[in-house]
């Protein structure tokens, strides 16, 4: 037990150090366009993610893996038949396990109204929804608004940083990647549940995020994949949608991915 607590404290310290580096080095301003100094590496991971997504879905043409945009108001293209119900359940379960982290980020962002709504959602889905396997809160109109530590860093003034493509998880930025790491350490469930339940919870959350990434990869349909440069189009869509979610860009500045090219 003592070793587990020491490991958690060490992980939390490393997470705080990472936050300090991001907040200290990044500019709070957002440059127009994109900052992609790792483009060659990003393109390689983009191709790997496309191939893996195609292998998992069994499609003839692999769809690029795109990280889900956590905004309850975002309109998402309907999932094709190959997107199994099991994948949606895994996403629901993992997302529900991440709700305490979402609530904590709401509080860190000084948004008590969102924290309250997400708490109600978590209680309903954990009880009535059988631990989050189902989403009765959503059917009741309690959709909440998901957030993460990347958004918390943005609220604290940390800049976006360079664009990145992560293995499996897809598009991100330096700030959001740091937030992804910190979220893994500050989830309150890690400090409440004993081992091995705590580790299994973290694994389930990762599985849920990967299921969501696969589910929302359908947002880039053939109209996008068949463009001259799918990587550039995916980068554009992610950055613009993420900035809209953070309130940086207006809705009319978002390029419609389904418009004629």
Image: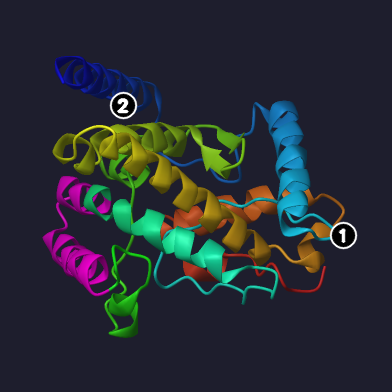
- Name the image quarter holding residue 259: bottom right
Q: Which mark is residue 253?
A: none
Q: Which residue is mark 1?
A: 60
Residue 154 versus residue 114 in the image, above or below: above
Residue 179 in the magenta stretch? The answer is: no
Q: What percent of the width, then of the height, locates residue 25?
A: 39, 21
Q: Which residue is mark 2?
A: 19
Mark 1, secondary structure of its residue = loop
Crowd rating for badge 2 (residues with CA inside 10 Å; few <14, some 14–19, many 20+): many
51 and 245: which is toward the camera: 51
Residue 46 versus residue 253 in the image, above or below: above
**Residue 249 appears in the figure:** no
Q: What residue is drawn where x is 32% and y is 74%?
A: 143
Q: Is residue 126 left or right of residue 39?
A: left
Residue 122 in the magenta stretch? The answer is: yes
Q: What percent of the width, then of the height, locates residue 96?
A: 32, 59
Residue 88 versus residue 204 in the image, above or below: below
16 and 98: which is toward the camera: 98
Q: What residue is drawn where x is 56% and y is 53%?
A: 213
Q: What percent of the width, then of the height, locates residue 137?
A: 28, 77
**Magenta span:** 102-128
Q: Main secondary structure of the magenta part?
A: helix
- Name the image quarter holding residue 11: top left
Q: Are marks 1 and 2 in contact (CB under 8 Å)?
A: no
């Amino acid at each position: 037990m003592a070793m587990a607590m020491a490991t958690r404290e060490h992980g939390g310290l490393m997470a705080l150090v990472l936050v300090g580096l991001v907040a200290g080095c990044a500019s709070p301003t957002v440059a127009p366009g994109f900052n992609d100094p790792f483009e060659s590496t990003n393109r390689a991971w983009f191709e790997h993610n496309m191939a893996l997504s195609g292998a998992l879905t069994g499609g003839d043409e692999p769809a690029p893996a795109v990280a889900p945009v956590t905004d309850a108001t975002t309109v998402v293209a309907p999932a094709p038949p190959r997107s199994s119900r099991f994948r949606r359940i895994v996403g629901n379960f993992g997302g529900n396990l991440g709700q305490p982290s979402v609530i904590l980020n709401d509080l860190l962002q000084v948004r008590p109204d969102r924290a309250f709504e997400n708490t109600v959602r978590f209680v309903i889905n954990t009880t009535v929804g059988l631990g989050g396997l189902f989403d009765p809160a959503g059917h009741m109109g309690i959709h909440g608004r998901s957030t993460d530590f990347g958004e918390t860093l943005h609220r604290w003034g940390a800049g976006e940083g360079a664009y990145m493509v992560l293995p499996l998880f897809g598009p991100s930025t330096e700030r959001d990647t740091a937030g992804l790491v910190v979220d893994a350490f500050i989830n309150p469930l890690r400090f409440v549940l004993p081992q091995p339940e705590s580790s299994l919870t973290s694994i389930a959350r990762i599985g849920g995020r990967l299921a969501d990434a696969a589910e929302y990869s359908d947002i880039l349909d053939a109209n996008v994949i068949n463009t001259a440069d799918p990587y550039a189009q995916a980068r554009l869509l992610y950055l613009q949608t993420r900035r809209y979610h953070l309130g940086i860009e207006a809705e009319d500045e978002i390029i419609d991915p389904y418009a004629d090219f």
